[in-house]
């Protein structure tokens, strides 16, 4: 544990940028208000998904037909686009772990709010927006080292199963921002109802990331590059040309391990940093190019 802490602390600047932080941590209540404002601006309703072992907070914009159970009028209503958030606020200072990892700048939610899909659903990460005192597994050790473990993936699997049953979805498109890409790739490898995978500034090679930055490896997780061959669906990976946190070579390492490389595209966005204006890129290049 001492070795883990010393290495992580020495790379605080990296962690702060990676997790989308500003110099000021912001009170938990302010972070919740920020998310509520983003969601309300695009008619996304909040909902707590009581998955196990982690509850997941969600914001959703669902078509009236999907919500009511009436006959669908469009093939698009059988599909939902799922946005998975980045890691959140894990550290407050060089020596102080955050008491709550709820993000200050929820990039995944911002992208979801700018999306034009008929059904769009944002899934926060475990321990975000849920009140950690009610979640016994939400401990500092979890959100600084175990945030990609099998318990996390199991909770997301349940979430997708429950959403599928409730709203009669047949297909999912997954969007993973930053560390959320680790979760998205696991889900894409495990499920047969995921038809499209997007990552945005995504950590697609956790071992390469650790080696590049000289930080301690994550505990109890699966490196996306090791399961790349299991993901045989169309996919687009956005990288930032000026991203010095999640470097573009990590996405290239992932694609190099795919069974069918022709199904993947890497799009490098000129001038983009890790915490740049990805929502604008998303709405203009992917979701709403003609609006």
Image (cartoon, grey):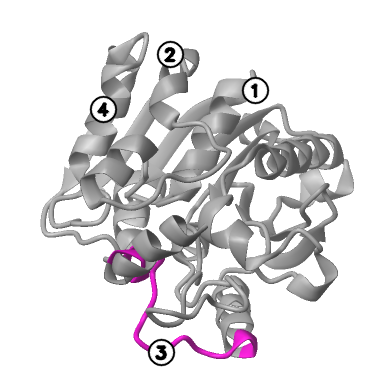
Describe residue 73's horizontal placement relative to residue 233 as left or right: right
The residue to which callout 3 is attached is: 24
Which residue in the rendered view is the most extreme toward the front?
2
The answer to which of marks 3 and 1 sits earlier in the sequence is: 3
In the foreground, 94 or 74: 94
Residue 22: within the magenta?
A: yes
**204 left or right of 146 in image:** left
The span from disc 1 to disc 2 (Cα, nearest Å) is 14 Å
Quickly name the residue at label 4: 253
Question: In the image, which is nearer the foreground, mark 1 or mark 2?
Answer: 2
Q: Secondary structure at mark 3?
A: loop
In the depicted structure, whether residue 1 falls above or below residue 239: below
Q: CA distance from mark 2 to mark 3?
A: 41 Å
Judged from the image, the secondary structure of the residue bearing numbered disc 4 is helix
Q: Earlier in the sequence, mark 2 or mark 3?
A: 3
Question: In terms of sequence position, does the residue under pointer 1 or pointer 2 come before the other?
Answer: 1
Residue picked out by circle 2 = 229
| Residues drawn in magenta | 14-29
């Amino acid at each position: 544990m001492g070795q883990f802490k010393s290495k992580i602390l020495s790379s605080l600047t990296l962690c702060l940028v990676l997790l989308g932080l500003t110099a000021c941590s912001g009170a938990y209540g302010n972070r919740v208000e920020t998310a509520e404002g983003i969601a309300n601006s695009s008619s996304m309703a909040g909902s707590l998904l009581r998955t196990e072992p982690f509850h997941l907070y969600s914001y959703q914009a669902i078509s009236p037909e999907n919500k009511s159970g009436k006959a669908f009028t469009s093939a698009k209503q059988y599909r939902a686009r799922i946005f998975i958030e980045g890691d959140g606020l894990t550290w407050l200072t060089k020596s102080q772990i955050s008491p709550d990892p709820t993000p200050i700048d929820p990039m995944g939610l911002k992208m979801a709010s700018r999306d034009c899909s008929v059904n769009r659903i944002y899934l926060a990460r475990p321990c975000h927006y849920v009140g950690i005192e009610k979640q016994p597994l939400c401990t500092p050790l979890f959100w600084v080292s175990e945030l990609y473990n099998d318990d996390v993936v199991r909770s997301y699997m349940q979430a997708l199963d429950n959403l599928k049953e409730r709203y009669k979805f047949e297909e999912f498109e997954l969007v993973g921002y930053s560390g959320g890409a680790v979760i998205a790739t696991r889900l894409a490898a495990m499920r047969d109802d995921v038809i499209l995978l997007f990552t945005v500034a995504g950590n697609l090679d956790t071992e390469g990331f650790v080696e590049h930055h000289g930080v301690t490896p994550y505990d109890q997780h699966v490196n996306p590059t090791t399961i790349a061959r299991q993901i045989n669906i169309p996919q687009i990976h956005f990288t930032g040309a000026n991203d010095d946190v999640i470097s573009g070579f990590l996405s290239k390492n992932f694609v190099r391990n795919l069974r069918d490389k022709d199904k993947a595209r890497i799009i490098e966005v000129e001038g983009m940093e890790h915490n740049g204006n990805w929502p604008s890129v998303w709405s203009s290049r992917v979701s709403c190019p003609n609006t």
